[in-house]
Amino acid sequence: MAIYELDPVERIGVAAVGEPGRRRFFLLATGSGRTLTLGCEKAQIQALLVRVNQMLEAQQVETPDEPALAHGEAPDSGTVPGEPEWQIGEMGLGYHEARQMFVLVASQGAAGETGASEAPPDDAPSVRFWLSHDQVIAFSKQAESVLSSGRPLCPRCGLPMDPSGHPCPVMNGARPIF
């Protein structure tokens, strides 16, 4: 299995291409003389952000309103990613106590995988991104910004709405029982 190391990461961020509701998501990173573009799902980024926030709290890392982006700056929001090297199947986040760094691990998904629970093949490539506290905070804020620029949520049911509206279950007579 090929394992790539971006140690340390110089830049990391999320990009979305396309119209809201039909966007493709990418994880973009630069480090160790290499630039990576990996395809991913919106749900993977959402789950990663939940884990990032849990780990920042567990490590008692202060999260300022405006993180310093000098080292670990996110890619420009206008960056249009090229074709991804591969599609991410699994992601994990850990913390290395001795180095006081976060490590994000992304492994390639099985061919034709659509978020299935199938484990990646033994020879699937993986990459480890080593991130400082400031880089994790900046990544979190940048990824949140990309995710929030999608479709607005319905104030009644919380589901995403298309410009033409959506079939709202609350308006369809399905009311919560108290």
Image (cartoon, rainbow, N blue to C red):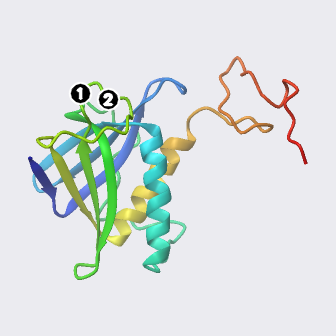
Q: Farthest residue in the front direction?
A: 118
Where residue 76 sits: x, y (%)? Answer: 36, 44
Kindly indicate whether the residue at mark 1 contacts the one at mark 2 (C-beta within 8 angstroms): yes
Q: How many marks?
A: 2
Say which quarter of the image contains residue 153.
Answer: top right
Residue 100 in percent (x, y) is at 28, 78
Task: Name which residue lies at 12% across and 52% down.
Answer: 4
Residue where numbered disc 2 is placed: 113
Q: Is residue 163 above or below residue 52?
A: above
Viewer-side residue, 126 vs 15: 126
Q: Type of residue at label 2?
A: Glu
Q: Quadrant of residue 68?
A: bottom left
Asked if residue 151 is positioned above or below residue 49 in the image, the reply reads: above
- Looking at the image, is 139 positioned above or below residue 17? below
Foreground: 151 or 97? Answer: 97
| Residue at left offset 24%, top offset 33% | 110
Q: Residue furthest right?
A: 178
